[in-house]
Amino acid sequence: MAAGEGMQTTVFFDHLWTDYIRMAPRAATLKAVFERGGETVVNDHVAFRTFDLDPIRIDALEPHILALGYKRFAPYAFPTKHLTAWGYVHTEKWQPRIFLSALDTSKLSPGAQTIVRELCTQIDPARIKDPSVFWSGRLWKPVTHAQYQSLLQESEYAGWLAAIGLRPNHFTISINHLNKHPSVDAVLQVAEAQGIAINTEGGRVKGTPAVLLEQGSTLADQQPMQFADGTFIVPTCYYEFALRHRDASGKLFDGFVPASADKIFESTNVKRSS
Ligand code: NI
């Protein structure tokens, strides 16, 4: 990307990180722990959630990502969660990947669809024209806590998005760039030593070297959020850890593994198994 073509990718990610650690302060704590231990923390990818409704469909948000120098890498589907997604890679390979998913709202009950459509009708389309939409948070008035809970019953994703809005759902530490912590489990142990709970859905470590990607994550921080009828503490954002492997031709895997990501999504669940 030539200079002057708009926002630079590093500036874009600085804004995202500032918003993210406000929602997930423990991620900043954990990053600092690794850095104090002499590690360089590199971001593997950041992920966003949206609805498949105007004006925040993937197609409407994606132009900002492409303008930063990203290109579509691969589409993904998560049928049991009614999600589709795109992975994006930057033309400068050292830049973090981006994962943008959307909920197929047609799979929700009529009642839940009504709630979600009402949120999207409140969005000022002008907000979508600026890259800052990716750290805008709620683009609608707060839902009631009862609406939040009724969405959660059908889709944890829908409830999260209604309450938390459009912003980074997680950042991801690239284990490939760590020197003293060579495995997902080694990184998870550092998080646990800080008193941070781990997502154990599908096991502590999701994926294997055979599928070229191993992942783990914290459980989302819990933060007070404003609802129409008061302030309630809800899961916000989490920190992910990714170890990428090389394929038979020696090329580092750039994609995502749906079976693993399906479990990583559950890092924001309100009901927690651990
Ligand atoms: Ni991820």
Image (cartoon, rainbow, N blue to C red):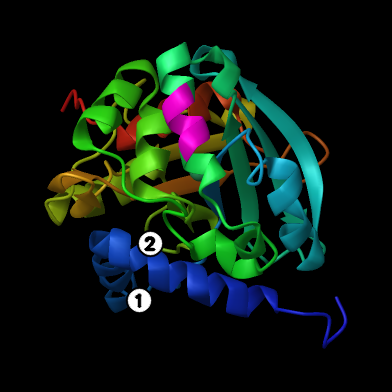
Task: Name the residue beneath numbered marker 1.
Answer: 38
Q: CA distance from mark 2 to mark 1?
A: 9 Å
- On screen, residue 167 above or below 155: below
Res. 23 visible in picture: yes
Task: Name the residue beneath numbered marker 2.
Answer: 180
**Is the stretch drawn in magenta largely helix, strand or loop?**
helix
Res. 254 visible in picture: no
Callout 1: CB less than 8 Å from ligand 1: no
Secondary structure beneath dot 2 equals loop
Residue 77, how many percent across, how many down?
A: 65, 22
Q: Circles 2 and 1: CB distance less than 8 Å?
A: yes
- On screen, residue 12 above or below 58: below
Q: Amino acid at mark 1?
A: Gly
Q: Nearer the N terminus, badge 2 or badge 1?
A: 1
Left or right position of 22 against 65: left
Question: What residue is drawn where x is 46% and y is 24%?
Answer: 114
Q: Is residue 115 magenta?
A: yes
Q: Is residue 231 magenta?
A: no
Residue 171, how many percent across, how many down?
A: 46, 56
Quadrant of the drawing holding the N terminus: bottom right
Out of 155 and 24, give the one closest to the viewer: 155
The residue stretch that appears in magenta? 114-118
